[in-house]
């Protein structure tokens, strides 16, 4: 039995016959646009420019920590910033479990004003494998429960490891402002921590860490008041430089002037030869070593182990000397670029 057309389908067929087109007469319904809700109760405190500064700071921080962890744990480590978000403290606190360990980091500004501490949290999966590596382990443990409870010995190792992350903060911020980050304490009950109010503004920096097959997250919580003080100091410094008429000038000549006073080792290399250990063992005073080079051949002059010049052996005021006969092409190119 043939399908029965609805009234809407009949109207569409009639319209297509009259207009000579098979396109629908009704415009396609456009997809609804999604809008982000703005919380007027708690407006954002930091502009995109301020968050961009934090992005630059912690991009450098992630590179420093990847290098430092690789040297400590004897593994290739990767680190990158996943997100920088302005939130309320309860969102950071609610994400932590009752058995999680949170690190309290005290911060001292240049004006020595008292500020609320910075908080750090590392995934238990990462920290347990860090500790295992510190104790000489070689295999990665993939089965760690988020409710893992650290022993007293592991808490001591946890503290020593987290101090590397704190030192990385101090080194990273030194480019912008001198901040003194000091280890405060390990907070074993994050839900009981009350130094920061639940509704206070914070900025959460999420750094993804990857070690071998293990992957986890480092979360750093900066209180809003602390960041406001930091940005205020930076703004005052920039305004003061503008008022004083300080212009950034090319100081390469001054730098070169100070570098020229450095002491470097210069060696004249006569030649190369390979000998067996038995031949070296049987060497005595008066033996002759053949360098397989003509007596009038040029010698290589090295500066700090790098070949810079070619020269000939000679005598100057009863002292053995080397006459420079040619300059290394690479060195010559650098000298010409510095002169220009």
Image (cartoon, rainbow, N blue to C red):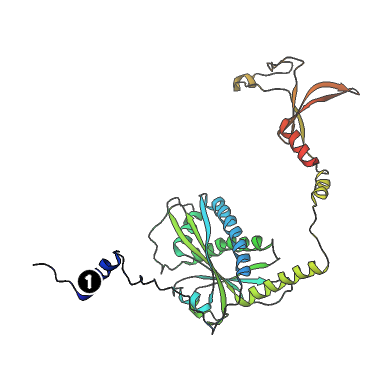
Relative to residue 295, is residue 272 drawn left or right?
A: left
Q: Which residue, given by chain and number where applicable, does mark 1 sit on?
A: 9
* Position of residue 127 measured from the top left corner of the image (x, y, whole percent): 48, 61
* Position of residue 111 measured from the top left corner of the image (x, y, whole percent): 74, 73
Q: 10 Å neighbourhood of mark 1: few (<14), some, or many (≥20)?
A: few
Q: Residue visible at 84% across and 25% down?
A: 321
146 in relation to 297, above or below = below
Residue furthest left as drawn: 1
Residue furthest bottom as drawn: 41
In what quadrant of the picture does the N terminus appear?
A: bottom left
111 in relation to 252, above or below = below
Relative to residue 334, is residue 254 drawn left or right?
A: right
User: Which of the pair 305/130 is nearer the observer?
Assistant: 305
* Position of residue 134 measured from the top left corner of the image (x, y, whole percent): 51, 55
Picture mark count: 1
User: Which of the pair 67/25 is nearer the observer?
Assistant: 25
The answer to which quarter of the image holds residue 340 is top right
């Amino acid at each position: 039995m043939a399908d029965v057309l609805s009234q809407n389908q009949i109207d569409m067929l009639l319209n297509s016959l009259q207009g000579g087109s098979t396109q629908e007469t009704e415009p396609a319904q456009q997809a609804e646009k999604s809008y982000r809700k703005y919380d007027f109760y708690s407006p954002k405190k930091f502009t995109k420019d301020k968050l961009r500064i934090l992005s630059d700071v912690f991009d450098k921080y992630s590179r420093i920590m990847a290098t430092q962890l690789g040297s400590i744990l004897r593994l290739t480590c990767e680190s990158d910033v996943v997100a920088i978000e302005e939130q309320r403290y309860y969102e950071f606190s609610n994400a932590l479990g009752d058995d999680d360990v949170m690190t309290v980091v005290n911060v001292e500004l240049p004006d020595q004003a008292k500020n609320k501490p910075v908080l750090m949290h590392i995934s238990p999966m990462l920290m347990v494998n860090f500790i295992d590596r510190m104790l000489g382990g070689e295999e990665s443990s993939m089965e760690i429960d988020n409710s893992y409870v650290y022993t007293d010995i592991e808490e001591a190792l946890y503290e020593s490891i987290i101090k590397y992350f704190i030192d990385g903060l101090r080194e990273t911020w030194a480019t912008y402002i001198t901040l003194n980050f000091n280890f405060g304490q390990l907070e074993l009950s994050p839900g009981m921590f009350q130094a920061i109010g639940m509704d206070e503004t914070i900025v959460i920096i999420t750094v993804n860490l990857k070690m071998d097959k293990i992957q986890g997250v480092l979360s750093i919580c900066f209180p809003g008041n602390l960041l406001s003080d930091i940005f205020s100091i930076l703004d005052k410094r920039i305004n003061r430089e503008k008022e004083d008429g300080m212009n950034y000038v090319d100081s390469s000549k001054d730098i070169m002037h100070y570098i020229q006073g450095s002491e470097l080792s210069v060696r004249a290399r006569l030649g190369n030869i390979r000998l067996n250990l038995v031949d070296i063992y049987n060497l005595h005073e008066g033996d002759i070593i053949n360098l397989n080079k003509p007596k009038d051949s040029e010698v290589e002059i090295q500066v700090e182990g790098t070949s810079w010049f070619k020269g000939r052996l000679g005598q100057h005021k009863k002292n053995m000397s080397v006459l420079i006969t040619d300059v290394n092409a690479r060195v010559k190119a650098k000298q010409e670029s510095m002169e220009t």
